[in-house]
Every structure is written in C-alpha cells, then in structure tokens.
Image (tube, grey):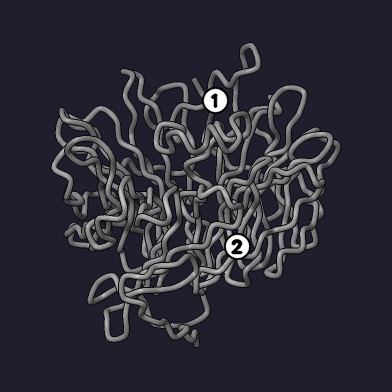
Amino acid sequence: MRIRPITLCFGLAVMPGFAVTAHATYTFTLLQDAGGMQDSEAVAINSMGESVGWSQTSSGFDAVLWSVTGTTTVLADLGDEGDSAALAINALGESVGFSATATGDDAALWSSSGTPTQLGKGGGSGSAAVAINASGESVGYLKTANGYDAILWHSKGAAQLLGDPGQQHFAEALAINGSGHSAGYACTAVTAGNCAAAEAVQWAPGGKATVLENVGGGSDSVALAVNGKAAFSVGYSDTASGGVDAVRWSPIGLPTVLQGLKNSTVSEAVAENDHGESIGYSDTAKGDDAILWGSKGSIAAVLKDPGGQGKEFALALNDSGKSVGYADIAGGGTEAVLWQPSGKATNLGALLGSDWTNTKAVGINDFGDIVGYGDYNNGTISGTYGFLLTPSAGAEVSAAPGPMEAAPELSTWAMLVAGFAGLGVVGYRSERKRQARRAGLA
C-alpha cells in the first residue's frame, strides 16, 4: 500500500518544496530548484509520486530527483564535469539518464539516494539510458563510428547490444516494459551520418530483434512505446504519399493502423497502457488534435481543446485512460491539460493559477499524480519550475493501489527518438513532438 504524505497549507506563501491546495481536487507542490538558477524541469514520474529531471546550475545542469513533498536530491555526477540529466524513474526510485565525463556523455543509473553507477559502454564513445523498468533494466543508445547502437543494460550495469536488423549500427531503443521487451527503431540506410530510412523494431528480453511491419509504404517507421502486459508497441509509419500513420504492432510485428481524423495526413501514437489504449495526435486544418485510441484501433475520443487554438498534444497515459499534455492558448504559450477517457479536458494551467504561464504536464501515474513544468512568477520567485499535482483526499484516483511497474513517461523517452542522442538537453527541450517524428530521421 502506498502511503501519501501529509501536506500543509500555507495560504499564499508558496516556497519551493512546500505544498499548497491549488484546487478542491488537487494539492499543488512546487518542486525545489536545486541548481540555484531558477531553471528546472521535471520530465518523469513514478508510482510513488517521485519525479526526475534536471536543474540548471552556474556551470551547467544537474540531474535531480524530487520527492513527493517537492524536496530535491541532486544525483551525483559520474565524472565531475558538471552536466547530467535524469530521464526516467522506476517504482524503487532508481533513475537513469546521462552524465558528462572527460570522454563524453555516459549512461548513468542512480540509486534512490543519488549514488551513480556508470552503465557499461561496450567500447563506445558516448551513451545515454532513456527508460528503466521495475527490475532496474534500462535501454538507450551507444555511440558508434556510424551512429548509435541500441543497448540494454541489466540491473547491475552490464551492457548488452540489441539486435540490429538494419546492419547499419544506427539504432536506438526508446522504451522497455516490465518483462524486458523493448522498442525503438533500426536504420536500414545511412547517408552522410544521418539515418535515411528506418524500421520500427521490438526486441525480446534476450536481444533478438523483430522488425515491425511498415504499413504505409514510406521510408520510416518507429516504435515509441511498448506496453507492460501484452508487449504491444505503438508509434508511426510513413506512407508512400508523404503522410504518416499512427500504428499499433503486435509482439510478432503485425500492424494495426490507428484511425486518424477525417482528412488527416499525419497521425502518430506515442504511448499505450496495459488495456491497449493509446494516445497521440492527428493533424487538422488548424493544427493537431490529441487522440485517444481504443484497443481495436478506432478513435475512442478526440481529446478536447481547452485552449481553443486547435493545437493540443497528449504526452502520457495511465491505466485508467487518463492522459496529460498541453494545449496552445490565445496570445501564445501553452497550458497543461488533463484529459478523461471521455475526452473531457481540465485546464491544469488554470488550476495552478495566475502565477504560472507556459505550463506543460508531462507525466501521470496510476494514482493520478501529475508532474509538469512551466514559467512561475509569484513576485519573489521567478523562473522555470516543476510542479506536482496530487489528487486531494476524497478525490477520484486513477487506479487501486497495488504493485506497479514504473513505466517511463512520454516526456522522457518516446519523445526523444533519434534526436536526443545528437542534441542533448538543449535540443530535447526545444520541441518534443516534432523530435518524435523527424529529428535524426530526415
């Protein structure tokens, strides 16, 4: 059983690491800025309500673990080079990401207390872990002379290269489930150091690769997520006409095209829960609409647009079918959003209040805890901060307490795709959704 901490109400006096009641159904916690530069981003949450990300420092940025009360644990650097970022966290509070060393960025595993372990590099010259499961297995990439190899790290840090069906030494694993199945892509052609064509791949726990069928007839397909029970993967497949189809693949690679909106030419699925529901988006004349798909591939709900601008993106999904992300708003900027399975939207930015602008929700767990970040200014504190929204006592939660696998959230792994390897944190921050389809694969 998970025991929630007692939160204290301080009226209008908000200090980092303290919680205040933001709404009748949520308790708000400002995540403490560890780096002193008033620039922090939380990018993933686990089933305990702990979150990870990074905080800017005077010399770079530090990987950070935030407790459910908003206090920080700075995750120690591997090489004392001043730059590190945590990208995913499991239910035990173990997190993974990368840490700069004298020879480049190295994949790192941090214990819940912040102690780092350098994950095996297998002879490479740079690496990063982007997802971790409940057993402490993680996946990511290993830099090579040609590009990147997909890699699995076992719980003790030993490295295992995953099968490369493209034979180009240019592949990345982007997600892993509790049974050790992982998903990503492998390039089939490389031109001038860039991936010219890619195929979606799912890897078995032993590293054997299954190519996921490209249904669209285009040059690229990528699997962005794999669910925890049935090991179905979701992602996208380019079409011969230049469009993009959202796709769900079975463990043996058989595809189901996820229905897009009428007249849509681009649809992508970015996450799937254990009930076979998927989220993503489909383009429209105005922009992009967030979508929830049912397990049969049809649209279960078009997620409502609280911003009224025709652009909204769902980034993370829990097992009750609730999803979070953001919507563009009039005059510029974004507001964090929570969507119910029916498609009903709650504007979380409005719940956070006028001190917050440009908010995005990037993770939700099965208890309904939501993590995100935005611009915060209350007169004494001004900068980019993370926030945690916790359902208040008596509020409906997303699932009954019980043993859970801490799946990495969209904000950390699926939206990276190939782009993160070459772009680092600055590139990752710039535009998650566009990176998910095109960075590194153009």
Residue furthest front in the image:
380
Which mark is drawn over residue 440? 1
The three-letter amino acid code for the residue at tag 2 is Leu
- Marks 1 and 2, the one that precedes in the sequence: 2
Residue furthest top in the image:
192
- Of badges 1 and 2, nearer the viewer stands 2
**Residue 15 point in image, percent of width and height:** 45, 67
Residue at figure coordinates x 30%, y 52% from the top left: 336
Q: CA distance from mark 1 to mark 2?
A: 29 Å
Q: How busy is the neighbourhood of tag 1: few (under 14 within 10 Å), some, or many (20 plus)?
A: some
**Nearer-the-camera pick, 247 or 349:** 349
**Nearer-the-camera pick, 39 or 392:** 39
Left or right, residue 332 beside residue 199: left
**Residue 190 point in image, percent of width and height:** 62, 17
Left or right, residue 30 beside residue 428: left
Left or right, residue 188 beside residue 260: right
How many numbered discs sit on the rendered protein? Answer: 2
Residue at figure coordinates x 31%, y 70% from the top left: 12
As helix, strand or loop, the secondary structure at mark 1 comes to loop
As helix, strand or loop, the secondary structure at mark 2 comes to strand
**Residue 165 point in image, percent of width and height:** 65, 33
Q: Which residue is tagged 2?
A: 65
Q: Is residue 79 above or below residue 229?
A: above
Residue at figure coordinates x 13%, y 42% from the top left: 308
Which mark is drawn over residue 253? none
Residue at figure coordinates x 35%, y 80% from the top left: 9
The three-letter amino acid code for the residue at tag 1 is Gly
Q: Is residue 114 above or below residue 384?
A: below
Quadrant in the rendering for residue 341: bottom left
**Residue 302 point in image, percent of width and height:** 18, 49
